[in-house]
Amino acid sequence: MRRPVYLDNHATTRTDPRVVAAMLPYFTEHYGNAASVSHRFGWEAEEAVEKAREQIARAIGAEPREIVFTSGATESNNLAIKGLAQAARRKGEHIVTANAEHKAVLDPVKALARQGWSVTVVACDEHGRVSPEAVEGALTDRTVLVSVMAANNEVGTLNPIGEIGRLCHERGIVFHTDAAQAVGKIPVDVQGDGVDLLSLSAHKFYGPKGIGALYVRRRDPLVRLQPLLDGGGHERGMRSGTLAVPLIVGLGAAIELAMGERDDEARRQRELRDRLHAAIAARIPGIRLNGHPVDRLPGNLNLSFADVDGEALMMAMRDVAVSSGSACSAANPEPSHVLRAMGLDEDLARSSLRFGLGRFTTEEEVDFAAESVGSAVEKLRGQGVAWSPR
């Protein structure tokens, strides 16, 4: 077994060697610009791009022409939220989101609020889930956009996006979901769930970093966005810039592999996750499972350890790579805003670790991680004040 053991697959995943193999020819052999339509090099690049567009569309129940390539889910979220807001301003100036969203949603919404937009942030429940009733209660006749994530990046809780999507469509409101953690891991169907805008990122499902996509509905309703970037009119005018063909090829290959292996992989990861949880719980008293006990991502395990600082715990188990919160905001010294939104006090929120199991995780690694966590918690509690169960 190689060390350190990697259990931070919600932050990013290893690029699958099969994806790398698919990408390599587009760096050195088929290196044309997909916008160069006057010669074979450009045609080959364009063909590869359109194939990837079809692969992504098939995975989420969309049409290929509804897929817009971006640099990742953060850009997709910004384009969806800011682009829709500016395009729909004549209809209304109210946006609804939730307090457990990723910062890549919350921060663009805050930016719009500073520009005069009205924003309602609904509260999640103790499991990190957003209820359709809470969303419905926040809607007004000036609401133009609702943004609720499909799966939480910290605690893995799945939101009822199908119910929220139907609710929005009944009111003529555009529904966006950040599905960066969901695509390739759980079923996602933009038609069945009434999703109008969907963000995804390749590096969350064993593709390369720096490439993602935004689904933009073209029918019932036709969704219009104001672009964030001007110049060249690429991607139907919504995202100008020379397309990163090798990365797009990698995104397409990764999502096709993920879809083909999704159900079997979900079962395997769920078994490993439960094995890890059981082993830790058998050795260490005073732990709390964060997130929904059933409706959560198969590879997610978020635990709080009473009277142990999460950062200190990570430092004490250097041979296991985990996270104490969202990797995208790890520089922030404040405790997880997701756990605080779920009602955890500051001490318990600071004592949490996120284990992210993935495609390459083995039983041996899970057992090693459980042993490492147990030893580290016992050591830290032994160095501190007397511990008693809460």
Image (cartoon, rainbow, N blue to C red):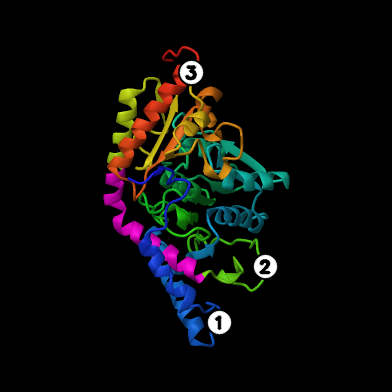
Q: Is residue 123 magenta?
A: no
Q: CA distance from mark 3 to mark 2?
A: 57 Å
Q: Which portion, as a residue range, is magenta?
A: 245-269
Residue appearing at x 51%, y 82% in the figure? 42
Residue appearing at x 49%, y 45% in the figure? 149
Q: In this picture, is 86 found above or below 364?
A: below
The image position of residue 303, as x and y in percent, is 42, 30
Q: Give the position of the N terminus as an image quadrant.
A: top left
Residue appearing at x 40%, y 20% in the figure? 286
The image position of residue 305, as x and y in percent, is 44, 25
Amino acid type for the residue under numbered disc 2:
Asp
Question: Disc 2 marks which residue?
Answer: 230
Neighbourhood count class around disc 2 (C-alpha, 10 Å): few under 14, some 14–19, many 20 upward = few
Q: CA distance from mark 3 to mark 1?
A: 65 Å
Neighbourhood count class around disc 1 (C-alpha, 10 Å): few under 14, some 14–19, many 20 upward = some
Q: Are marks 3 and 1 in contact (CB under 8 Å)?
A: no
Amino acid type for the residue under numbered disc 3:
Gln
Question: Disc 3 marks which residue?
Answer: 383
Q: Which mark is residue 190?
A: none
Label 3 vs label 1, nearer the camera: 3
Precedes in sequence: disc 3 or disc 2: 2
Q: CA distance from mark 2 to mark 1?
A: 19 Å
- Secondary structure beneath dot 1 equals loop
The one nearer the camera, 157 or 366, is: 366
Q: Is residue 95 visible?
A: yes
Question: Disc 1 marks which residue?
Answer: 36
